[in-house]
Image: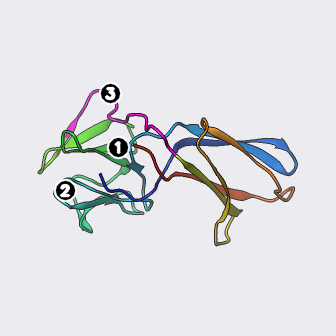
Amino acid sequence: MAATPGPVTNLTATAIAPTSVTLSWTQATQLVVTPGLGSFLDNAGNTWAVNAAGAVVRNAKAVPGGSGTSALTYVSSTNTIYGQDAASKAWYSWNGSSWTKTSGTPVKTLVGAVYSVKYRVTGTSPWTTFGTTTQGSSLKVTGLVPHTKYDMEVITTGGH
């Protein structure tokens, strides 16, 4: 599967000192894209994403019934697109014309994932890359300014 980098899930930050936090996240899985972040190609070469408004798009066109989506993933071995409803957190599969509720989650753990950790002062840009890690699902971010709000982002950039 060809893919662009995607965000991790369940990112939390815990202050451990005035100038540092520990970021923790759910270990990366196959690529999961969220509103406005990431895209992937299916076996037919279609580009899938969730736009910033939370609607599933295929080749930049809205997919029927795809509004209110918080996550989207693809299982290439079965050529199945899965979307997660933002309100209920339930997963649905796309059958080519409509969404069908599935049991459980289609998300599996990636092997060899590389995580890129970025931060910025809230309301500013661009992002500053703190570093990368391939170990576990947490990283200590240091060198922050006390009493300053930050946006933090962890992206998985590799794995299979």
Q: Is residue 1 left or right of residue 9?
A: left
> Where does the image place residue 84, in percent across and percent down from the top left?
34, 42
Judge from the rendering whether residue 75 lies leftward or rightward of residue 130; answer left or right.
left
Image quadrant for the C terminus?
A: top left
Mark 1 or 3: in front is: 3
108 part of magenta stretch? yes
Q: In terms of secondary structure, what is the magenta stretch mainly?
A: loop
- Please state which amino acid type lies under the numbered disc 2: Pro
Q: Tell me which residue sits at (26%, 53%) in the image.
A: 66
On screen, residue 37 above or below 10: below
Please tell me how crowded label 2 is: few (under 14), some (14-19), or many (20+) other residues with Cα within 10 Å.
Answer: some
Q: Earlier in the sequence, mark 1 or mark 2?
A: 2
Quote the CA–CA distance across marks 1 and 3.
13 Å
Under circle 3, the secondary element is loop
SS of the residue under disc 2: loop
Residue picked out by circle 1: 85
Q: Residues within 10 Å of mark 1 (few under 14, many from 20)?
A: some
Q: What are the residue bounds of the magenta stretch? A: 100-113
Query: Which residue is denoted by mark 3 in the rendering?
Result: 104
